[in-house]
């Protein structure tokens, strides 16, 4: 049996960034690994200029996300913004004065997240549980404009794996995207593992799909 920390992500809007620069800011359909690590890091009080602690956190935890099944479909909207000091042509170090941008948001999405420790973890579930109950920095759902509508902490429990852990959590149904799995399970590659010492750069990981009938492309 393994120990799991369960957190809930509820809010009127959420945004979990995919690969982009300034012009178009799409959102993934569920929280990314980089987004969840950022949220946990904020709760712990880890700053962006502390790469050692950020790497410790990344190396300490495994993550599974359940898209909680509800009576209506989650939809996306695209919001219009202007941004000053954006990179010229969205690459390099040159700057535009002002550019137009479009940013996607998920509306009324609910997610259940299972977090567990890897062997030899420098940041324990005990520390994470304390942090999500009393965050150091204000957590938000991908962007500062996306506040939470309920506390993060849901439960602490033991289970055989992340799938069993999430089955114990209401609403007890929904597609699970987990870092746990083997060759018998549907899987796909997702490039959302932050390279701490290379800002804006990401590595890929396998995600294993349990339940549901759709694998994101």
Image: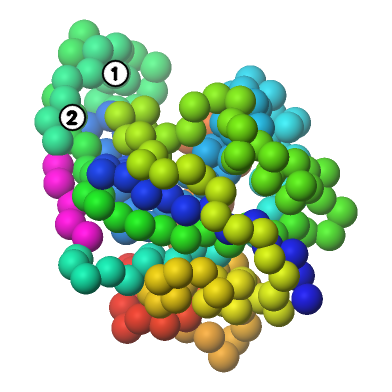
Colour basis = rainbow
Please rate how many residues cluster around mark 1, counting C-alpha atoms within 10 Å: few if below 14, some from 14 to 19, many from 20.
many
Q: CA distance from mark 1 to mark 2?
A: 10 Å
Q: Find the residue positioned furthest to the top.
A: 97
* Left or right: 194 as drawn, with respect to 89: right
Q: Measuring from the top left, give residue 117's x and y in whole percent.
A: 75, 57
The N terminus appears in which quarter of the rendering? bottom right
Specify start and end residues of the magenta stretch as a single range: 74-78
The residue tagged with tag 1: helix, strand or loop?
loop
Label disc, if present, on residue 86 of the rendered structure: 1
Label disc, if present, on residue 101 of the rendered structure: 2
Please rate how many residues cluster around mark 2, counting C-alpha atoms within 10 Å: few if below 14, some from 14 to 19, many from 20.
some
The C terminus appears in which quarter of the rendering? bottom left
Q: Earlier in the sequence, mark 1 or mark 2?
A: 1
Q: Marks 2 and 1: in contact by CB < 8 Å? A: yes
* Left or right: 163 as drawn, with respect to 121: left
Q: Measuring from the top left, give residue 139's x and y in whole percent.
A: 48, 33
Seen in the picture, residue 133 relative to 107 is either above or below; the reply is above
In reply to whether residue 178 is colored magenta, the answer given is no
Q: Measuring from the top left, give residue 168's x and y in whole percent.
A: 55, 74
The residue tagged with tag 2: helix, strand or loop?
strand
| Of the pair 205 and 67, the residue shown nearer to us | 67
Q: Measuring from the top left, give residue 211's x and y in whole percent.
A: 42, 82
Q: Is any part of residue 56 visible from this angle? A: yes
Circle 1 or circle 2, nearest the eye: 2
């Amino acid at each position: 049996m393994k120990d799991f920390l369960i957190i809930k992500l509820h809010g009127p809007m959420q945004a979990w960034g995919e690969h982009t620069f300034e012009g178009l800011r799409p959102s993934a359909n569920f929280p990314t690994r980089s987004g969840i690590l950022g949220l946990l890091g904020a709760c712990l009080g880890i700053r962006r200029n502390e790469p050692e602690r950020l790497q410790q956190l990344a190396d300490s935890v495994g993550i599974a996300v359940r898209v909680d099944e509800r009576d209506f479909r989650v939809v996306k909207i695209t919001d219009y913004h202007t941004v000053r000091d954006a990179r010229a042509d969205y690459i390099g170090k040159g700057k535009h004065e002002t550019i137009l941008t479009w940013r996607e948001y998920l509306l009324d999405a609910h997610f259940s997240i299972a977090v567990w420790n890897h062997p030899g973890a420098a940041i324990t579930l005990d520390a994470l549980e304390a942090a999500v109950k009393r965050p150091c920095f204000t957590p938000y759902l991908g962007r500062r404009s996306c506040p939470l509508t309920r506390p993060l902490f849901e439960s602490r429990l033991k289970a055989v794996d992340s799938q069993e852990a999430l089955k114990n959590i209401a609403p007890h149904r929904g597609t699970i995207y987990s870092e746990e799995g083997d060759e018998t399970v549907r899987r796909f590659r997702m490039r959302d593992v932050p390279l701490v010492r290379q800002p804006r750069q990401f590595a890929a990981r396998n995600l294993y799909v349990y339940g549901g009938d759709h694998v994101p492309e």
